[in-house]
Amino acid sequence: MSTALTTGRPWRVIALFSVPLLIGNVVQQLYQFADAIVVGRHLGVDALAAVGATGSMLFLLLGFAWGLTSGFAIPTAQAFGAQDFRAVRRSVAAGTLLTAVCSVLLTVGAPLLSRPLLELLQTPPELMDDAVVFAQISFLGAGALMFFNYLSAIIRAIGDSRTPLIFLTLACGLNVGLVILMVGAFGWGVGGAALATVVSQAVSVLLCLQFVRRRMPVLHVRRDDWRVSRAELGAHLRLGLPMGFQASIIAIGTLAVQVALNQLGTDAVAAYTAASRVDGLAVALLQSLGLAVSMYVAQNHGGGRPDRILRGVTQATWIAVAAALVLGALMVTFGATLIRLFVGGGSPEVVGLAAQMLAINGATYWILGILFVVRGALQGLGHTLIPTVTGVIELVMRVGAAVVLGTALGFIGVAASNPLAWLGAVVVLVPAYLHARRQLAAAPVSPMVWTPTTPIAVMGPTDGSMTVDAVVTASIGLPGGASTGSVPTVRRGRRVLPRSARAPRRTRG
């Protein structure tokens, strides 16, 4: 369901728009939260550490696949915006074929690589067997995860953002119930926890397919639509591969952190895993606010309202900092209490280490809040270079801190890698936004080009600030061969606008 962000009080519009994004993020984090509680309380600290030891490897491979399938939905949205329904169907067919191929490759190859990769990551021997079981079952169900993400993406691509949230909530709720049943009642160990995820995702895929069949005829692929050309497949890969590689770059940082943790032993791995689950709930709020800002900026940039962009980003920054301070205070004060939900009172060393990590992160959430808002604003303005560069900076800072500080300071050094990565990104992002802000302040307020499609929010898995999120504002093909891309321009005041930008005046909010 599309939403106009070009009228109304900026802070209120951004806050309200971030709510469904927040719900979706919190639902995912609550699932991980509950999953870790069940594993930690029923199976013990070693089992919790074994699950945590697979996190970076799963993120590397499945994160790439997630980014790939999300990119496949972009041509679908572009064709839908142009009201070219045959192109919509062919895009769905192309994306489905590519998703199927990627699913087969992961399902066949990744389980065979699980043990060698975990050995390469220097996983502690006492965690190896459980970690291999969890990883192999997760990879065997990669097809269900990929198709659930792909179906959710194409449903969002045609303007329905509520239905994917409903299915996500159902999937996470079912997942929690199955984890309790398979781990607690059936006693299937960490394999049961992984199987619960696979089964819940498979059920959600079936529900999505049924919904599309009954409610979304525009996505129904006909027989001749399956005859997609090499050029159409290439167009989808050109959009999907960069998003997949972005996730891979992020995952490399998590791999370095995982290696540093594995060298510190089981307690360190378990503490980091438990703290990350709690930390994810706080990060979800700030991430949702940043994504809402990017959508807000993109729409107002398209509507020629630089004044609203300036006010909105400033107000959102203050909201983010205030929320970060409150969340940080909660983490510092109640961190140890929350960690005991996972491991009970019999692991004081794990509780102490995890509480220290939450205190370090909580004290620096305000940096993360600024990072999400400023990066979202630049993405909404169509800047891609700086957000990408800051992703690389985060990688370098996180790896360097985990290796150097982890060796010198132990667990505290590894825990400090996230705040240092956030700081490194902000040092580059803020000057870039201030430069863009000066340009916006000099621009007149006037209507600009309205493209036939709204910017698309694309969200992905999170681990600290390591978030795959974007606002897609790519030009779209129009019937008759026209495009919203490069078109002749005329000068209007101090700005160069496309001829197609001449739109009727609207009431300014």
Image: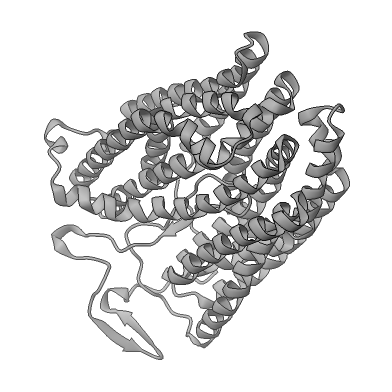
Q: Which colouring convention does the figure follow?
A: one colour
Residue 104 x/y as whole percent: 31, 31
Closer to the camera in the image, 431 or 191: 191
Instruction: Specify whether residue 235 is in view.
Output: yes
Q: Is residue 250 above or below residue 92?
A: below
Residue 158 visible from this viewpoint: no
Q: Nearer the viewer, residue 246 or 221?
A: 246
Please determine whether, in this image, residue 190 is positioned above or below residue 355.
Answer: above
Q: At 28% across and 33% down in the image, what residue appears? A: 217
Residue 364: where, in percent of width, then height? 75, 60
In this view, the residue farthest toward the top is 186
- What is the total number of numbered labels drawn onto the structure image? 0
Residue 169 location (% of width, % of height): 56, 31
Q: Residue at position x 36%, y 50% from top?
A: 71
Q: Residue at x 51, y 41 (%)?
A: 120
Residue 93 lies in quadrant: top left
Q: As drawn, is 298 to the left or to the right of 217?
A: right
81 to the left or right of 306? left
Q: Residue at x 15, y 37 (%)?
A: 225
> Where does the N terminus fall, quadrant-wise?
top left
Left or right, 64 with respect to 345, comes to: left
Q: Is residue 226 above or below residue 4?
A: above
Image-based side of 197 in relation to 373, left or right: left
Furthest-bottom residue in view? 493
Whole-percent x, y for residue 447 in the image? 41, 75
Between 335 and 50, the one lying in front of the other is 50
| Residue 102 image-quadrant placement | top left
**Quarter of the rendering occupied by the C terminus:** bottom right
